[in-house]
Image: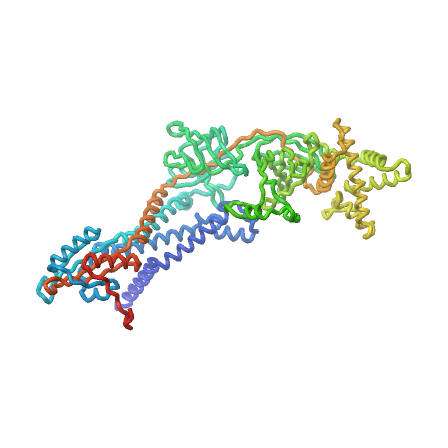
Amino acid sequence: MSDFPLRDRDSSRSQAVRATLELLASMRFAISLLTVICIASVIGTVLKQHEPLVNYVNQFGPFWAQLFLALKLNAVYSAWWFLLILAFLVISTSLCVSRHAPKYLADIRNYKENIREQSLKAFHHRAEAEVAGSTEEAARRIGQQLVSGGWKVKMQQRDTAAGPGTGWMLAAKAGAANKLGYIAAHCAIVLICIGGLFDGDLIVRAQMMLGGKTPYTGGGMISDVAPEHRLSTKNPTFRGNLMVSEGTQSGTAILNQSDGILLQDLPFSVELKKFIVEYYSTGMPKLFASEIVIHDRATGEKLEKRVEVNHPASYKGIEIYQSSFDDGGSSVKLHAVPMDGVSQPFDVEGVIGNSTEFVRKLADGQQDKVTLEYTALRTINVENFGGQDKSAGTDVRKVDLRQAIDERLGAAHKTTDKKDLRNIGPSVGYKLRDASGQAREFQNYMLPVDTGDGQPVFLLGVRENQADQMRYLRVPADPEGTMNTFMQLRQAMQNRAQAEKAARAYVQRAVDVSRPELAEPLTQSALKALELFAGQDSKLKAPDGRPLGGLQAISGFMDSNVPEAERERAGEVLVRILNGVLFELAQQVRQQAGLKPFENDEKTQAFMTQSVFSLSDAQFYPAPVVFMLQDFKQVQASVFQVARAPGKNIVYLGCLFLIIGVFAMLYVRDRRIWIWLTPANGGSHANMALSTNRKTMDGDREFAMLADKLIGARPLQKKTPGGSV
């Protein structure tokens, strides 16, 4: 058999290998990889990483959330394709360096003194002149001048027409660090990528693939998690989160994965003695600091440290960074205020992060289980009350042109909106979850807030899902600073006897004693207005089938029973009657509670006006009770990021190489000078040329200076083939 087919196969295989290596070592391939890495890094910066899937669903929708999850865009820097691109970039850059570095190193050592005389005439920078002395004397004199100027010089003796050894070629070079800069910059890319791969999830993923480690997706105590979900204390590289409450200690970090978590056991435990947080006037934190005690598990040694943002603590090669802070299990006492007029008030105590279950009786006699989840306690809430109504017209008589210009000029952070930042006190966040698992989120403020109209209100926030903004019911505070008058007024509207008593009190005050025949019709009108407002008219229904009340019910009644031409006037009369009856009803409930009756002044008018709006909106409040914060005991928790990152030293070395390489390539010019000396007229004839890697004005000036200093000549300009200079 012939061996030619085998040789053909070997040849084609070797050609494929060479083509593959050529592709991997090419600059285009490396630039393409860098472009993809830059795009991926932008995505990883814009899109929040390692968030729960429900957050992506709420923000982008189910289709895009599933697409992000499939492409691992929620964990870009640990995605398999991102690590693979980094690996290919390392290979590509390494091949490029291995292919070009020997050539550059050889070029650095080579003076290229064997260049031909005719070749010097082709250089852009060249000069000719007669110099004194023999060729050897001139060569040594010029060489000493170049050496004193920082050049490295090599001389070569050659034969000329005048005789053997009568010619001298002087070769000098400077700026060889430019070539070293190229090598350093490319080596820096390799080192940075290797450091990034080593400090990334590569080691952890290797343990998951080869060591039988799997993410944990359940709940419960950390101590109960099985060993297959834990990483050893000897794990060479990791980066996780450690949450420690005040007065407690923890020694297990959590590594978030796309499909669960891994637990990283630390060789020590961290005890949080005190957490310190300071705020700017805007309410933004300006200082996080944690006073901690590190407990060594092996030796029992205790070491006190202070951890601040950008000032980590280090122990046994593990860095402890201050990441953020959270609630560490604050206890709260809540008071349940009925909103449906049926439930009874009660008190409940709980811990943030825990929950309490209730059984509620429905109107049809059935029972409904409701879970109260304590989600957040915020002791400081700074809001801006300095905003102006942009829809309001501008009074041109009050416009100061100079002031308006000054407001818009100056520093970049200057704004034309005036700020009135105020701390409106603590708030509590909770969720009410029904038996089917559906939950609404609530946020209620502990203290009444003056929003600018002079009437303090309690803010009761609610939203259906986390992606929505909070919608607030504003409940007016009575003169005693409570919401009792409002709640009692809302319950009294449903009591027929109290409503009739208030209506007659209003009529007695409103009707002239000389016209008693108007009393009964006005009483019926007042009762009808209160009946509509209280949602007791069975003919008016909301879209969900519930009785419709509030100002919407009055508007619906007017549309159905009053001619369009008379609606505006009739509506004003009916609302005026309603306000009068509600005022009398409020006086009744305060009298029954043993409180001082309202004064007929502007404060009372503001309270009643806000009460009408709030009573109208309260029918849409989606919970039967409101949980108001009565008391709390705050417990802070520090969230640390613990990292063992041996690759960072490699990255630091790569950054140093990168700085050196960039500066060498940008600011160091590789230059070479050749001077050919031949005997002429009792002296020597010098033919000089200079080569540089970049054509700059500095190079032109340098050659002109060297030509004048070394051989006393002016540079010659090279002519183009057409004869022009």
Q: Quadrant of the C terminus?
A: bottom left
Q: Which of the two residues, 530 or 16, is positioned nearer the viewer here?
A: 530
- Residue 61 spot, x, y in % from top left: 57, 51
Marker count (numbered)? 0
Which is nearer the eye, 341 or 9? Answer: 341
Q: Is residue 370 above or below residue 76?
A: above
Describe residue 542's horizontal placement relative to residue 469 as left or right: right
- Using the rendered image of the protein, determine whether residue 675 is visible from the camera's viewpoint: yes
Q: Position of residue 401 (x, y in %)?
A: 59, 48
Is 269 displayed left or right of 507 in the figure?
left
Residue at position x 68%, y 41% from top? 622
**Relative height, residue 286 to residue 159 (above, below):** above
Q: Is residue 1 visible?
A: no
Residue ID at (41%, 41%): 238
Q: Name the residue nearer the viewer: 116 or 277.
A: 116
Q: Position of residue 134 (x, y in %)?
A: 10, 60
Residue placed most toward the observer, 576 or 615 = 576
Q: Quadrant of the N terminus?
A: bottom left
Residue visible at 39% across and 51% down in the picture: 86
Residue 313: % across, % down? 40, 34
Q: Is residue 561 above or below residue 6?
A: above
Residue drawn at x 21%, y 58% is 708
Name the residue furthest left.
Answer: 163
Determine which quarter of the picture holds residue 449: top right
Quadrant for residue 549, please give it.
Answer: top right
Which image quadrant for residue 20? bottom left
